[in-house]
C-alpha cells in the first residue's frame, strides 16, 4: 500500500469512527435530557400530590367527620397550584357496596357512575383521560391513594418536548460542522503521526542485502515508532550476524573440502603413473583412504552442527552418573597418549549426578580431550569434578601450549584452529569444540575455557544437576 493510499485509508477509518462517536454522543445527550426532564416532571407531580394529600386532612366538619364539600381554604390552595388534578372519594353505601364521588372545590361531591362491568383500573384510565383532554402523550399522570381518596395529578410535557426538539435540532445542525472540523484535525493528525512511520519504512527499504551495515534512524520523536525502529535495527543486527556466519561457514567449508580433494587428486595421479611400484600404489591408496575417512568425519560433523542449530537433534534427558562417563573417557585418553610423556589423572569425588544425555556428554568430553591431547606434548591431563548453583561440572586441564588471548574468544568457532599445521597433522578440522559447545548447550548446560599461553588450558563442561527421577521424554535441541 502506497503512502497516499495508507493516509486515505486511515483517514476514512477515523472519519467513520468520528461520525459514529458524534452521533452516539448527540443521541445520548438528547436521551439524557429527556430522562432528566421526565424525572423533574415526576418530582413536581409528587410534590403536588404531597400538597393535595396534606390539604385533604382538612376535608372534614367540626366533629371530625368528612364532609361532602371542599372548604374554602382547600379550594384556594388547589386552584392556586395551577396544575391539572382530580380527586375522587369512595364512600361505603352498604355491605359490599361503595359509591365513587368526584370532589370539586366549593361544590358538593358528584357521584361518578362507571360503565357497567368496568374494573377499577378502567375507571382510573377514564378519569385520567378526563383531566388530560385525551392527550395522554402530552401529559404524565400520577395516581396516589390516600385513605378513601384517590388523587390524580397531570403534568404537561409540552415545555420539555419543545426544549428537547430544540436540542435535537441544534445537534443535527452542529453534527456536520463538528464532523468537518474533526476531519480536518484528523487529517493533520494522521499526517503528523505517519511521518515517523514513513521515515522508518523508507530507511528499511534502503537497506540492501549487499550492504547490511545501514540502520534505521532510531530517534523518530514518537516513542512507539522509536521502539519499532530499534527492534528493526536489532533484527538487522541478527540478520547481519547470520549472513556473516553463513559467508564464513561457506568460505571455511569450501576451503576445508578443497584441501582433501586436492590431496585425493594428487594421490590418484601419483598412483596412476606408469612407473609406480606395487608398494607405492598401495601407499597412495592408503593415503586416499585416510583422507576419505577424515573428509567423511568432517561432513558428519557439519551435518551434526546443522541439525543441532536447526533444532532437529534429539537428546535424551535423564539422570546419569558423570563419574562413569569420565572414567570411560579416561581409558580412551590413556590410549591416545601411549608412547608420550603425558599422564592422565582423574580427581576423587563422591556421586556426581547430572541430568542430560549420557552418550552426547561422552562425545563432548572426547572432543575436549582430543583438543587437550593434540596440544600437549608432555605433562598431565587432569579431570576434576565441581558443583555450582544447581550445576555439576567436569574440568579437563592440560599442561600444553595454551591458547593466545586473541584466539580465546574464537576457540569455539567452526574450522578455527590456533595452530593449523598441528591440527592438520593430527586430523583435526576445527569442529570438535564447536560440537562440544553445541551439545552442551542443547542439554541446558554451558562450557567455559581459561588458558595461559605456554602453560596450558582448562575446559569446564557444566550440566544441570540431577534432582529427581529419570524423565522418559526426549528433549529436542
Image (tube, grey):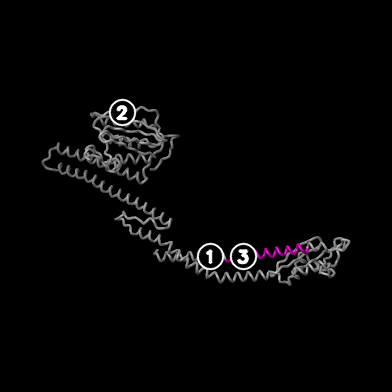
Q: Which of marks 2 and 1 is in front?
A: 1
Q: Residue at image x 38%, y 42%?
A: 314
- State which tag comes first along the sequence, 2 or 3: 3
Q: Which residue, given by chain and number where applicable, does mark 2 sit on? A: 345
Q: Which of marks 2 and 3 is in front?
A: 3
Of helix, strand and loop, which one carries label 3? helix
- Quadrant in the picture for residue 167: bottom right
Instruction: Give the percent coordinates (x, y) of residue 74.
Output: 81, 66
- State which tag comes first along the sequence, 3 or 1: 1
Q: State the residue in front, 66 or 140.
A: 66
Instruction: Give the percent coordinates (x, y) of residue 183.
Output: 48, 67
Quarter occupied by the C terminus: top left
Q: Residue at image x 56%, y 72%?
A: 173
The furthest residue to the right: 63
Total numbered badges shown on the rendered structure: 3
Q: Residues within 10 Å of mark 3 (few under 14, many from 20)?
A: some
The furthest residue to the left: 275
Q: Which residue, given by chain and number where applicable, does mark 3 sit on? A: 31
Magenta-drawn segment: 26-52
Amino acid at each position: 500500500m502506497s503512502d497516499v493510499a495508507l493516509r486515505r485509508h486511515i483517514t476514512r477509518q477515523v472519519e467513520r469512527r468520528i461520525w459514529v462517536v458524534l452521533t452516539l454522543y448527540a443521541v445520548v445527550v438528547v436521551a439524557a435530557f429527556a430522562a432528566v426532564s421526565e424525572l423533574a416532571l415526576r418530582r413536581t407531580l409528587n410534590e403536588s400530590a404531597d400538597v393535595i394529600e396534606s390539604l385533604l386532612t382538612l376535608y372534614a366538619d367540626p366533629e371530625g367527620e368528612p364532609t361532602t364539600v371542599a372548604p374554602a381554604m382547600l379550594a384556594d390552595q388547589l386552584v392556586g397550584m395551577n396544575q391539572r388534578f382530580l380527586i375522587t372519594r369512595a364512600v361505603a353505601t352498604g355491605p359490599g357496596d361503595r359509591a365513587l364521588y368526584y370532589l370539586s372545590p366549593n361544590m358538593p361531591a358528584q357521584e361518578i357512575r362507571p360503565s357497567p362491568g368496568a374494573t377499577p383500573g378502567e375507571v382510573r384510565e377514564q378519569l385520567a383521560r378526563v383531566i388530560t383532554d385525551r392527550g395522554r402523550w402530552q401529559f404524565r399522570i400520577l395516581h396516589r391513594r390516600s385513605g378513601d381518596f384517590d388523587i390524580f395529578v397531570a403534568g404537561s410535557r409540552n415545555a420539555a418536548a419543545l426544549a428537547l426538539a430544540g436540542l435535537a435540532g441544534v445537534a443535527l445542525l452542529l453534527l456536520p460542522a463538528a464532523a468537518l472540523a474533526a476531519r480536518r484535525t484528523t487529517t493533520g493528525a494522521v499526517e503528523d503521526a505517519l511521518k515517523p512511520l514513513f521515515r522508518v519504512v523508507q530507511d528499511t527499504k534502503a537497506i540492501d542485502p549487499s550492504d547490511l551495515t545501514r540502520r534505521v534512524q532510531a530517534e523518530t520523536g514518537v516513542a512507539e515508532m522509536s521502539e519499532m525502529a530499534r527492534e528493526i535495527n536489532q533484527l538487522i543486527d541478527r540478520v547481519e550476524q547470520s549472513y556473516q556466519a553463513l559467508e564464513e561457514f561457506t568460505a571455511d567449508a569450501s576451503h576445508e573440502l578443497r584441501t582433501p580433494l586436492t590431496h585425493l587428486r594428487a594421490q590418484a595421479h601419483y598412483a596412476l603413473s606408469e612407473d609406480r611400484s606395487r608398494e607405492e600404489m598401495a601407499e597412495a591408496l592408503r593415503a586416499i583412504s585416510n583422507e576419505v575417512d577424515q573428509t567423511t568425519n568432517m561432513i558428519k560433523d557439519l551435518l551434526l552442527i546443522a541439525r543441532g542449530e536447526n533444532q532437529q537433534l534429539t537428546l535424551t534427558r535423564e539422570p546419569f552418573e558423570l563419574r562413569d562417563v569420565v572414567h570411560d573417557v579416561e581409558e580412551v585418553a590413556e590410549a591416545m597418549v601411549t608412547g608420550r610423556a603425558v599422564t592422565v589423572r582423574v580427581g576423587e569425588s563422591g556421586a556426581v549426578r547430572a541430568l542430560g544425555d549420557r552418550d552426547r556428554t561422552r562425545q563432548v568430553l572426547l572432543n575436549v580431550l582430543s583438543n587437550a591431547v593434540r596440544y600437549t606434548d608432555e605433562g598431565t591431563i587432569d579431570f576434576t569434578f565441581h558443583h555450582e548453583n544447581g550445576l555439576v561440572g567436569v574440568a579437563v586441564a592440560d599442561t600444553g601450549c595454551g591458547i593466545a588471548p586473541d584466539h580465546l574468544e574464537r576457540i569455539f568457532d567452526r574450522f578455527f584452529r590456533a595452530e593449523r599445521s598441528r591440527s592438520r597433522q593430527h586430523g583435526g578440522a576445527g569442529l570438535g569444540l564447536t560440537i562440544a559447545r553445541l551439545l552442551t548447550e542443547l542439554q541446558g548446560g554451558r562450557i567455559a575455557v581459561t588458558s595461559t599461553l605456554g602453560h596450558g588450558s582448562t575446559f569446564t563442561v557444566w550440566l544441570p544437576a540431577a534432582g529427581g527421577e529419570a524423565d522418559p521424554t526426549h528433549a529436542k535441541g
